[in-house]
Image (cartoon, rainbow, N blue to C red):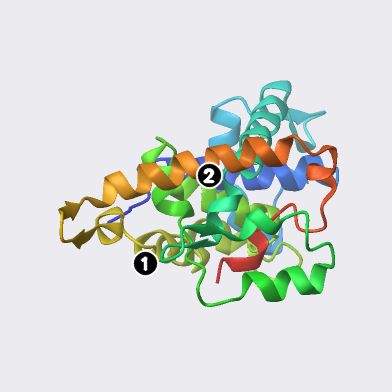
Amino acid sequence: MYEIKPGQRELFAGIYLLDHMVGKPTSIPIFLEGNDQDLEPVLEWLLTHGHVEILNEEAYVPSPKGRDLHKKFGQRYRDYLTNYDLYCAVDLAAGEFAFARYHDIEDEDEWDTYLEDPRWEDLRVPVAAQKGLDPIEIVFMSFLNECRFGRDTSGWQFDLLLGSVWDEILNICNTAIKTEALGWCDDQGEVPGETVLNDIIAQGTALIEDLHLHEEFNTHPQDNAWQQSWN
């Protein structure tokens, strides 16, 4: 079972708030009012770790260290999308990837419909774990990218640390297909799930290399396939 590690929620909430401050850009008054009062523990964490600073004794602003953290976190997510998002749709029975037709389907609606085919299995969580990545971090970054924390709705400040969105992230990770479930048996014996997953990763690596040979890879209407299937 995946669980949020001690300090991980504060780190992620801090990065979310940095994204809010850098993206606008905006500052947060040191005298918090209304719903912003729920940001106090997050701001304290950021200040303690040097990721924000107080400007003119009036407002919290991102520090150079905070901007660097925000930039590196975003780059890790972009790197993940570039190299792993194709595992969101794999036909285990046929051994096929939806992204094998990446350059054949340019219409966004048609691509969405194609990805909704029930034969596709989402293997991003087991692949992330197998490659030494933290699935919780990956799902959090996708939620951040998709504005799933409701930054424009009332009460998002409370949700940042205590909202149900954290349960959603854990639910995605804990209900994802397990590596051992990928195993199968035939007349020649048992094939462990880890062996199957490693073969899928090898096929995916070859496919992503082939896709990168196309100059238009990063301009496809569905570059961010994560937005299609986290439900």
Taking depth in this image into account, of 25 and 87 the one nearest to the observer is: 87
Residue 210 in view here:
yes
Disc 2 vs disc 1: Cβ atoms closer than 8 Å? no
Numbered badge on residue 150 = none
Q: Position of residue 61 (x, y in %)?
A: 76, 34
- Secondary structure at badge 1 equals helix
Q: Amino acid at mark 2?
A: Gly
* Residue that carries the numbered disc 1 in the rendered image: 175
Q: Choose between 58 and 182: the one closer to the eye.
A: 182
Lateral position of residue 222 relative to residue 186, left or right = right
Residue at 27% over, 56% down: 1
Q: Residues within 10 Å of mark 2 (few under 14, many from 20)?
A: many
Residue reaching furthest top? Answer: 64
Q: Residue at x 36, y 48 (%)?
A: 197
Quadrant for the C terminus, please.
bottom right
Query: In the image shown, does 150 or 187 lie closer to the viewer?
Result: 187
Q: Is residue 223 above or below residue 198?
A: below
Q: Where is residue 182? Give x, y as percent.
A: 30, 58
Is 27 above or below relative to 223?
above
Looking at marks 2 and 1 on the same chain, the residue that comes earlier in the sequence is marked by 1
Residue 204 — which label? 2
- What is the spatial separation of the Cα atoms under label 2 and label 1, in whole angstroms? 22 Å
In percent of width and height, residue 229 lies at: 59, 67
Q: Residues within 10 Å of mark 1 (few under 14, many from 20)?
A: few
Q: Residue at x 58, y 76 (%)?
A: 117
Element assignment for label 2: helix
Q: Nearer the viewer, mark 2 or mark 1?
A: 2
Report the amino acid beneath label 1: Thr
Q: Quadrant of residue 150?
A: bottom right
